[in-house]
Image (cartoon, rainbow, N blue to C red):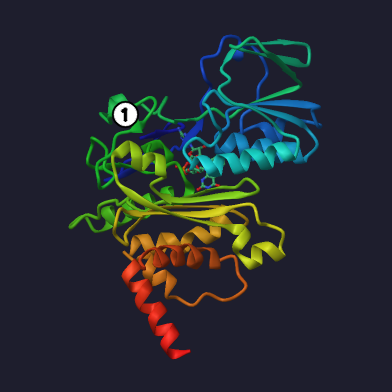
Amino acid sequence: MEVDGRRLRAAHFVIATGSRAGVPPIEGLKEVAYYTNENVFDELHGRPDRMVVLGGGPIGCELGQAFGRLGVRVTIVEMLPRILEKEEAEAGALVQRALEAEGVRILTAARVRRVSGSGRVVRVELEKGDALEAEALLVAAGRVPNVDGLGLEAAGVAFDDKKGIVVDEHLRTSQPHIYAAGDVAGGYQFTHVADYQARTVVRNILVPWPKVTVDYSVVPWCTYTDPEVGRVGLSEEEAKQKGVAVDVWVQPMREVDRAVVESSEDGFAKVLTERGRDRILGATIAGERAGDLIHELVLAMKHGIGLKAISATIHAYPTFAEVARKTADRYQRSRLTPAARRLFEWLYRRQR
Ligand SMILES: Cc1cc2nc3c(=O)[nH]c(=O)nc-3n(C[C@H](O)[C@H](O)[C@H](O)COP(=O)(O)OP(=O)(O)OC[C@H]3O[C@@H](n4cnc5c(N)ncnc54)[C@H](O)[C@@H]3O)c2cc1C
């Protein structure tokens, strides 16, 4: 490897060059001044009156809300039918309502046709004919792996411009002594996944046999809008697409006393279990502290703990964490067959 003219030799290498903001091929975009998450906080001097955020994914929503709260009139433009499209539809709708209540304008199913600039104003033309004007344009339309300029071809390391470096289940590239970890290796692009991969790589280099295999079966993440959206495993839509039959258990936050006293009733927990079985396949919590609350379900999923066990676990009152137990109680109540219900009613009458 050559670094600033110096040659470095090693038995093993790790490529961890991360990713950068992707810039969609929109006519005129390269000719106007635009920001990305990388430079917006350094190079945006003073508060623009209006900002257009290109992209209603997690980064667009988080930054859009942040700038809205700083007094900027923000419009988020999303080409898909809804924002946060990887999340449960109800979670996206909840965040959309919250952002709109704060004055953030959200345009969905809105594809940008052309961007142009005159003076300090950027003009964003949409395919449907509308046009938006703003003093600042923030591009938050996906990430691309940093694979350029590394000489990967010369090293014989296979990669894809969009998906990043190709790795096997031990995180080895097509050259077995070269590993890749983090965003550049594609897949889940989160700090905690990069951390997990880095640990795996170190372990596999230090103890080459038997090698550790990466396991992405239970990976949580959170979107840090207010309200937050915490997520692990399948969403209902993904389950449908994959043909996985599920039962769905939904618990509104408005029935969680701590949420009520803290006026944070907007939100819910939604848990998917395998149809007819107590096996958690996915969960979403939307609302106050969702990113923290999801971890009870992450732990349960990872270690095969079902809703019956969560329902039987004493949770401190009054806490937001009760939302998991209350969701699990719904599952438990559903298990009461008509015959069991009649039996309990008979026992109740008899013991009164
Ligand atoms: C706005 C935003 C918000 C995010 N929020 C979250 C969040 O809340 N939670 C979460 O889990 N994840 C979040 N992420 C994703 C998270 O930042 C990434 O998944 C994580 O940083 C990946 O770590 P990494 O080490 O692979 O890459 P990086 O952290 O990007 O580090 C790569 C480093 O390599 C350097 N580099 C690149 N090319 C070269 C080269 N040729 N030579 C030398 N050095 C080079 C880069 O300068 C950089 O310092 C967010 C990302 C963005 C953009």
- Residue that badge 1 annotates: 159
Q: Name the residue rendered at 78%, 16% in the picture.
A: 120
Q: Is residue 285 left or right of residue 173?
A: right
Q: Which quadrant is home to the N terminus?
A: top left
Q: Name the residue rendered at 55%, 13% in the picture.
A: 26
Q: Quadrant of residue 165?
A: top left
Q: Position of residue 16 (x, y in %)?
A: 41, 41
344 shown above or below 270: below
Taking depth in this image into account, of 164 and 28 the one nearest to the observer is: 28
Q: Position of residue 97 (x, y in %)?
A: 66, 40
Q: Is residue 232 left or right of residue 175?
A: right
Label 1 element class: strand
> Does residue 196 appear in this view?
yes
Q: Is residue 189 left or right of residue 79?
A: left
- The kind of residue tagged 1 is Phe
Taking depth in this image into account, of 25 and 19 the one nearest to the observer is: 25
> Does residue 16 appear in this view?
no
76 shown above or below 16: above
Q: Quadrant of residue 136?
A: top right
5 shown above or below 325: above
Q: Name the residue rendered at 38%, 64% in the picture.
A: 300
Q: Position of residue 247 (x, y in %)?
A: 36, 52
Taking depth in this image into account, of 347 and 262 the one nearest to the observer is: 347
Q: Name the residue rendered at 60%, 64% in the picture.
A: 256
Query: Ligand 1 near label 1 (Cβ, under 8 Å)?
Result: no
Taking depth in this image into account, of 268 and 42 the one nearest to the observer is: 268
Q: Position of residue 4 (x, y in %)?
A: 46, 32
